[in-house]
Amino acid sequence: MAGYMTNSEMPFLDHLEELRWRIIKALISVVLFTVIAFYFSDIFLQWLLKPSTEINAPVTLQVLKVQSIFVIKLEIALIVGVIMSIPVILYQIWSFLAPGLHQHEKKYIWPVIIFAMISFCAGGAFAYYLIIPYALDFFLNLAPENISNNIAIDFYFGFILRLIVVFGVVFELPVLSVILSRLGLITPQFLRKYRRHSIVIFFILAAILTPPDPTTQVMLAIPLVLLYEVTIIISYVFAKKRKEKLEKDLV
């Protein structure tokens, strides 16, 4: 009886062991890329400082704590390390799930990984080149003439990095739609049915994730709505392919 229980539990334990090693490999990738990014952190630091030098409103960034620059460099390196590890993380997830997938589903892994990286970079670029300059100008120009814009440097970088990461994650919506549509978990009919509900949710999320001004919130909500429409199109394409495959199999 004891032997029977051990044998029946082994597959589950093997899965846990495999999952543990997949997580370890993903963490090793994050640590490795974080160390590399920290070495080049001065370049990233200057790149993130650039928006503050190209706006109309005058601003002075101040270091208020001894360890501020080190902590900022570490945060930047960690975020870059996670972003650079996205292909490795997705590959580890796929490798763990691959035994349960059909052969025709496995071929989508690299297109999905590449699509995910491009989408995140597109979202980050959208925030960096469009949202951040406008948001900085909007907030800093609110100060009266007799008040100087002296900002703690850690708050500045927290503001910039938050927007870049938020928009990068938001632009992953089409990637998620590819995965869920390919697995048959969402359909165009389902997405169209809950379009209005989704738009309301998008504006609520935009209000939570962005600085508290209506224009910035709208500038996040509009891409979300557009990406949702792209999601419907993607779902429609996969649903059509699935229907054609079923018809072909029946013949």
Image (tube, rainbow, N blue to C red):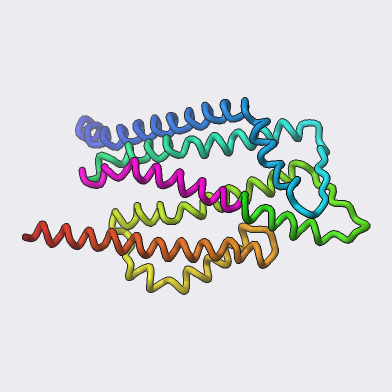
Residue under the image location 51 percent in, 46 percent down = 121
Number of dots carrying numbers: 0
| Residue 112: in magenta span | yes
Q: Quadrant of residue 80?
A: top right
Vertical relation: 246 (above or below) 96:
below
Residue under the image location 75 percent in, 57 percent down = 137
Of the pair 192 and 149, the residue shown nearer to us:
149
Q: Which of the image's four quarters has the C terminus?
A: bottom left
Q: Which of the image's four quarters has the N terminus?
A: top left
Of the pair 143 and 2, the residue shown nearer to us:
143
Of the pair 22 and 122, the residue shown nearer to us:
122
Name the chief secondary structure element in magenta: helix
* Side (left or right) of 21 relative to 83: left
The x, y position of residue 116, in whole percent, is 43, 46
| Residue 107: in magenta span | yes
Residue under the image location 37 percent in, 37 percent down = 91
Q: Which residues are magenta?
A: 103-127
Q: Quadrant of residue 139?
A: bottom right
The x, y position of residue 198, in whole percent, is 47, 68
Question: Residue lying furthest left in this view?
Answer: 251
Question: Residue lying furthest right in this view?
Answer: 146
Q: Quadrant of residue 142?
A: bottom right
* Side (left or right) of 225 relative to 45: left
The x, y position of residue 55, in whole percent, is 75, 52
Residue under the image location 17 percent in, 61 percent down = 244
Vertical relation: 130 (above or below) 34:
below
The x, y position of residue 99, in whole percent, is 25, 39
* Side (left or right) of 148 relative to 241: right
